[in-house]
Image (cartoon, rainbow, N blue to C red):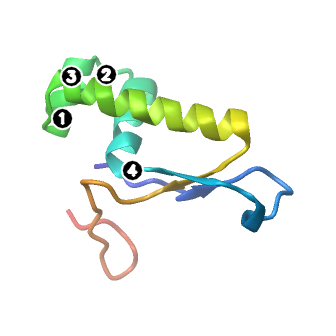
Amino acid sequence: MSEPRAYYFKPRAVPLCELEEITLQLDEFQALKYAELDRKDQSIAATAMKVSRQTFGNILASARWKIADAVVNGKALKIEGGPVELMRGPCGGEHK
């Protein structure tokens, strides 16, 4: 599981208290990374995530919708939680 470099994104110059927030779960983050940045085939990405290809497609569709909603409608985007949790070491790094 890749760890996000940042966990929060918001429109510039808008106070957080004025924004609606969307949560992108860690499995959605990972699906986006595999599909868009790593350009993995959905069946290969699904295997890497230990889910079916159909489940991977559903996770990816949800992630894309949330990002589009945040960008188009000026919402804050928080990355956290879901069915996957990262284990952090003493310095904030991920346990292997």
Per the rendering, the mark at residue 40 is 2
Number of residues whose C-alpha sits closer than 10 Å to that of mark 3, classed few (under 14), some (14–19) or many (20 or more) = few
- Could you tell me the amino acid type at mark 4? Gln
Q: Nearer the viewer, residue 3 or 25?
A: 25
Query: What residue is disc 4 on?
Result: 25
- Residue 3 image-quadrant placement: bottom left
Q: Residue at x 21, y 22 (%)?
A: 54
- Could you tell me the amino acid type at mark 2? Lys
Query: What residue is disc 3 on?
Result: 54
Tag 3 and tag 2, C-beta contact below 8 Å: no
* Mark pair 4, 1: CA separation: 17 Å
Q: Residue at x 30, y 76 (%)?
A: 89
* Mark pair 3, 2: CA separation: 15 Å
- Going from the N terminus, do you reach mark 3 or mark 2 first? 2
* Mark pair 2, 1: CA separation: 10 Å
Frontmost of labels 2 and 4 is: 4
- Could you tell me the amino acid type at mark 1? Ala
Q: Residue at x 26, y 20 (%)?
A: 42
The answer to whether 9 appears left or right of 41 in the picture is: right
Mark 1: secondary structure: helix
Q: Is residue 8 visible?
A: yes
Q: Residue at x 25, y 29 (%)?
A: 56
* Mark pair 3, 4: CA separation: 18 Å
Q: Is residue 38 visible?
A: no
- Going from the N terminus, do you reach mark 2 or mark 1 first? 2
Mark 3: secondary structure: helix
Per the rendering, the mark at residue 20 is none
Query: What residue is disc 1 on?
Result: 48
